[in-house]
Amino acid sequence: MELTFNTATSKDINELVRLRIAYMKDDFGSVSQEEKTGMEKQLPDYFKRKLGTELIVFTARDKEKIVAVAYLHIIEMPANSVLLNGLYGEVLSVYTEHEYRGKGICTRLMQNLVEHGKKTGLGRIDLKATKDGYPIYKKVGFTDVEARYTEMRIKFI
């Protein structure tokens, strides 16, 4: 197995849709047909609009097939005392197909993602870690966050 590591382009949209749905199944245990259909409808347009600008998708490929991904969502906000340029990133959808797990692929993707964040001047990169992902994220430099604010949310759907 010889893997290549790079970033996704518009040619990869179908594979990105497939892997996003696989990630959701893995994370939530199942995806209903209605949810799958909804994602298949929304995701191609989202990737067309965001890929390569606000969304950088780091990939591992076995020949032509993408077998692992890590998304870096780049966010711009008003500057503040800790983000003078207002730029930060959020990691989303870190996923490796089952048969490729345990081979260091995710670590390599995350190293590439972190290096990209440094080179592009992001003030920080945030993520929400699963139990399985936590040791990998620690290995590449992420630390636990002690926040002075309580995270809150309001749901509309």
Image (cartoon, rainbow, N blue to C red):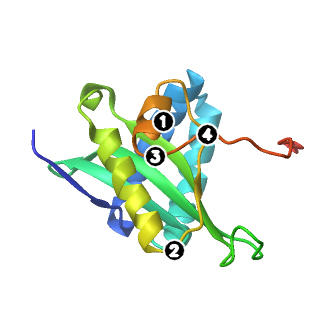
Q: Secondary structure at mark 4?
A: loop
Which residue in the rendered view is the most extreme toward the top?
Answer: 29
For this view, does 94 lie left or right of residue 86? left
Residue 13 seen in this snapshot? no
- Closest to the camera, between mark 1 and mark 4, is 4
- Please report contact status of discs 1 and 4: CB closer than 8 Å, yes or no: no
Residue at 40% across / 38% down in the picture? 139
Q: Secondary structure at mark 2?
A: loop
Q: Secondary structure at mark 1?
A: helix
In primary-sequence order, the first of circles 4 and 3 is 4
Mark sitting on residue 23: 1
- Closest to the camera, between mark 4 and mark 2, is 2
Q: Residue 92, position in %: x, y?
A: 54, 48
| Spatial CA span between label 3 and label 2 | 17 Å
Residue 14 seen in this snapshot? yes
- Closest to the camera, between mark 4 and mark 3, is 3
Q: Which residue is mark 2?
A: 121
- Please report contact status of discs 4 and 3: CB closer than 8 Å, yes or no: no
| Spatial CA span between label 4 and label 2 | 21 Å
Circle 3 packing at 10 Å, graded few (<14), some (14-19), many (20+), is few
Residue at 25% across / 31% down in the picture? 100
Of the pair 28 and 54, the residue shown nearer to us: 54
Q: Secondary structure at mark 3?
A: loop
Label 1 amino acid? Tyr
| Spatial CA span between label 1 and label 3 | 23 Å
Mark sitting on residue 75: none
- Closest to the camera, between mark 1 and mark 3, is 3
Residue at 34% across / 57% down in the picture? 112
- Closest to the camera, between mark 3 and mark 2, is 3
Label 4 amino acid? Lys
Q: Which residue is mark 4?
A: 128
Residue at 32% across / 53% down in the picture? 59
